[in-house]
Image (cartoon, helix red, strand yellow):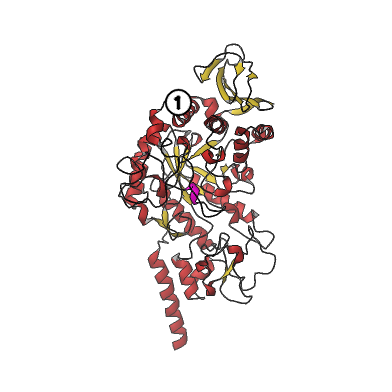
Amino acid sequence: MNATKLLTCLTLTAAAAAATAQIDTSPVPPQPRASTLSPHWQHGVFMEIFVRAYQDSNGDGIGDLKGLTRRLDYLQKLGVSGLWLMPITASADRDHGYATTDYRAIEPQYGTLADFDELVREAHKRGIGIVMDYVINHASHQFPPFQAALKDRASPWRSWFVWNPDPGPGWDIWGKLPWYDAATQPWTFSGLLKDLPPPKTGSPDIYFGTFGPHMPDFNMRNPDVVKYHEDSLRFWLNRGLDGYRLDAVPHFIENNAKDWNDQPESRALTKRFQDLIKSYPGRYVVCEATAEPIAYGKPELCGGAFAFNQNYEIVKAAKGEPAAVQKMADYYRTMAPMMATFLHNHDIFTGRRVWDQLYGDEARYRLAAASYLLLPGTPFVYYGEEVGQSGIAGKNADDDAPLRAPMSWTPSNRGPGGFTTGDQPYRPLALNRSRHNAENQQREAGSLFNFYRQLIALRRASPALTLGHYAADRVDGLVWRFERVHGRERVLVAINYGDTPAPLTVPAGARLLHPTNASGTTLPPLSLRVYRLEPR
């Protein structure tokens, strides 16, 4: 070997070693153990939690895992069966967490692995499962292997990402070009991505990033990348994690400028990851797949997926739009029961906070909540939704920050009972916190919190509402009635989204479950009735 080749080999070895030294890529053997949770825990109601926004335990103004552990009694009182934690792994963004820098480490601002282990143990004591967001499609540009690939084009890490000096014409993902030239450091660009100048054809460092230059896509055709993710998934499962929300699964593989979304290869990988996770007994998987959510919800793909677009119809129905009521009924006649339902989540494209969408109309708010808490699927409540928390001001129409403010625990959110004991929370507080906070809402018998708590308890106590299929539905303008059936148990739900009373015919022998003080054969405006029917 001549001196030049020797120097090249030493450089390659050094680059690879540097990246490896900063992240753990070692194999993780499977250690499947039976779940200690109830057999149908994943069919209960979940709470989506942004840990940064939930509870600060050390006064630095940032929520953390110890703070979340402190609030488990509150979540148990509400009645949730599971928690979906937005990314808690180490990240570069210091906010949402989707720019991952280490897939086997806790974000330092959130705590330690020991804090995670304690959270899981304490949640399990209360019968609550923990599902973690796993960002599988892309990493941060600060992810050590990507940095090693930038420094040395011959690095073995180069093949972990997608490069193309001439991507060709026609690329457009959500109004932007998804190819970036690393030589120009595009992750420093502060304007709108659609205004970022395109890379010059022929540059050797053009890479692919579905969600922007700061988050390069993995090359999921590389078996080493797939193996790394499989080992990392097992890393958390071996610690007792109860499942995953897999992020952006239709974007694993892009074949060309036209065929970049929901490709057959992406579906095959999704099924592979689902099989790995479910090889651990009692685990749950739910996927983010906005284009074809019902397909991804089926067992042959992910086995669970968010019911995107139905959230819009639920809110429209609550506002009194007859067409939306009919669309909901049509959807549930064919919907797979493993879909995950919600009113909105952490992304602004799913809508503002419910309080803001419904302009503080609590009667309509309750109907929106009842609509998805009593229907098939796995409901996901977004933190603060159960107390009517509002959003905060944003910089522009696409800003997610208004949805991700600190949880409203008390009117001030300062002091031992509030979000933080420090002087400054990481983000402004909700504007309606003076009344819509967890402290006040738990005390008020007729509050939104107690409404959510009652419906969740009703769902948990009824196999028909938890596991039953949708049947015997009827829509009359703004009145929707349907049954949930499991074995011999039948539950009738009737909702009047309108401003006028409606006649209500109930079969003989029906027993009123909610509200317990209702009477008569009329369904009042903006009201709900739930009955247990005689077995057939």
Q: Give amino acid for label 1.
A: Gly
**Quadrant of image for the C terminus:** top right
Q: Nearer the viewer, residue 230 or 253?
A: 253
Question: Is residue 536 among the parts visible in the rendering?
Answer: no
In the rendered structure, the answer to whether residue 499 lies left or right of residue 228 reads right
In the rendered structure, which segment of residues is drawn in magenta? 401-409
In the rendered structure, the answer to whether residue 264 lies left or right of residue 112 reads right
Q: Within 10 Å of the Cα at label 1, are there few (<14), some (14-19), or many (20+) other Cα atoms?
A: few
**Residue 478 drawn at (x, y percent):** 66, 28
Q: Which residue is mark 1?
A: 446
**Residue 73 drawn at (x, y percent):** 35, 35
- State whether the magenta stretch is mostly helix, strand or loop: loop
**Residue 473 drawn at (x, y percent):** 66, 25
* 402 falls in the magenta region: yes
> Helix, strand or loop at disc 1?
loop
* 106 falls in the magenta region: no
> Is 228 rendered above or below residue 522?
below
Q: Which residue is farthest top?
A: 508
Q: Residue at x 49, y 71 (%)?
A: 149
Q: Can you tell which quarter of the image residue 257 is in?
A: bottom right
